[in-house]
Structure formats: structure tokens, C-alpha cells
Image (cartoon, rainbow, N blue to C red):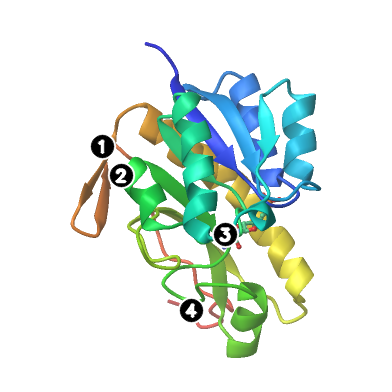
Amino acid sequence: MPKLRIAVLASGSGSNLQAIIDRSVAGGLDAEIVLVISNNPDAGALTRAKQAGIRQMCIDHRQFASRSEFDRAVVAELQAAGAELIVLAGFMRIISDIFLAAFPDRIINIHPALLPAFPGLHVHRKALDYGARFSGCTVHFVDGGVDTGPIIIQAAVPILEADTEDSLAARILEQEHKIYPQAIQWFAEGRISIEERRVKVRGIVPASGAQISPALEMAE
Ligand code: GAR
């Protein structure tokens, strides 16, 4: 079977990109990263791609008069590279209908919260201020909203008394690096379907048990 051709879009340090590269190098992914695009010329993601010998480019959104013009330029590169799945990994731009129409049900995103709680920006601050006992991360399909598309996989991470935005972000990031390659692998294996809002993954092992935080002290 030929490998799934994926493109990764990233604006920042690119640790999720690195997790996908590492899985792929270790032979655990039926996917090949054909292109990495960043809107930020200083993104660590571009350096990581370069180091891994992956084709990369910066398309700086500031050079475009509108969101649609920027999206058209990005879509043109993705199509020219023959990308079959678009992986947003810390890509801090909202994508337009032009982008969605070019890759229907073929754009996925990772968000550092347990959606639908805490969409948008500053999510760790929001989770801490709210007093939530859990946060986590979510891999989901991208639709027209902000962090609203059908959910593929989530990891729940307990929030600790001593947590700061940074400590919580770091523990969540560790889980992001596990669930994103897994979601991509399911997609590459053709096991994912979307029924209304619900994503079905053929043949998955169901999660067991519940997590309670803080832990129970009473005997069950
Ligand atoms: C990750 O935590 C990702 O979930 C988040 O940005 C970080 C990028 O880290 N994405 C969003 O907030 C999207 N709204 P990375 O560059 O090290 O992969």
C-alpha cells in the first residue's frame, strides 16, 4: 500500500510535528510528510522539517491582503504537493471556506483542551481559572467553526493544585504527542468515518474505567 501523503501546517515550535516525524522514522506510521508549511518565518517547525530532510516553506500571512488570498496560496502548494491529509499542528490561523472546500473532511487539528470546553486561545489559563479538575487535548476534524469539528480522540489530564499554565501545558503536550500520531495512523489505515458529529474508528479498543480527580478516599 502506498503511504498516505500528509502535509503539516505549524506556526510554532513544532513539537507535535516532531512527534509525527519520530513515529514515521520509527516505522509506526503509514504516512509520509510531503510538505511542512508555516506562516511564521521563525517557526521551530521549519527547522525541524529541514533537519529531517522534509520539504518545507514559509508562506507569511502578513504578505497577503486577505485571509482568502493567503488560503489560496497555501491550498495551491498543498495541492501541488499531492497532500491527501492536512495536519494542523499548532497552526495559529483560522482557515477559510476556500481551504475547507479544497480538502473536505481531510483537515485535522489538535487543540490543547478537552473540547468542547475551552476552545480558542489561552486555554490553560481558562481551565485553571475555571477550576476544572481535568483538561487535556483533542484531535478533531476541522469544520467552519473555531475548534468545533467532529472529535477523533481525546486524552484527559488531571489539573493539579500546584499547576501553572506552563506546567499544565507541558503535561498536556506529552499526551498530544501520543494521540496525534495515533489519529493520523487510523486515517492512513482508512478506518475513520464521520457520521453526523460522531467519528467512528473501525476496530478500536474501547477505553476502560473512569478517571476521578482528586482521587476518592472513601472505600467503594
Ligand atoms: C500545541 O499545544 C497545540 O495543541 C496548540 O499549540 C501548541 C503547538 O505546539 N494548538 C493550538 O492552540 C491551536 N488552537 P507545538 O508547536 O510544539 O506542536
For image coordinates 66% across by 24% down, the residue present is: 55
The residue to which callout 1 is attached is 202
The image quadrant where one finds ligand 1 is bottom right
Q: Amino acid at mark 1?
A: Arg
- Please name the residue shown 58% across and 59% down the image: 65
Displayed quadrant of residue 196: bottom left
Figure quadrant of the N terminus: top left
Q: CA distance from mark 4 to mark 3?
A: 49 Å
Q: N-terminal of the two: label 2 or label 1?
A: 2
Q: Are marks 2 and 3 in contact (CB under 8 Å)?
A: no
Any part of residue 103 in sight: no
Alpha carbons under labels 1 and 3: distance apart: 31 Å
Disc 3 marks which amino acid? Arg
Residue at mark 3: 93
Mark-to-mark CA distance, 2 and 3 = 18 Å
- Residue 47 location (% of width, % of height): 80, 35
State the residue position of label 4: 219
Mark 4 residue element: loop
Amino acid carrying label 4: it is Ala
Circle 1 or circle 3, nearest the eye = 3
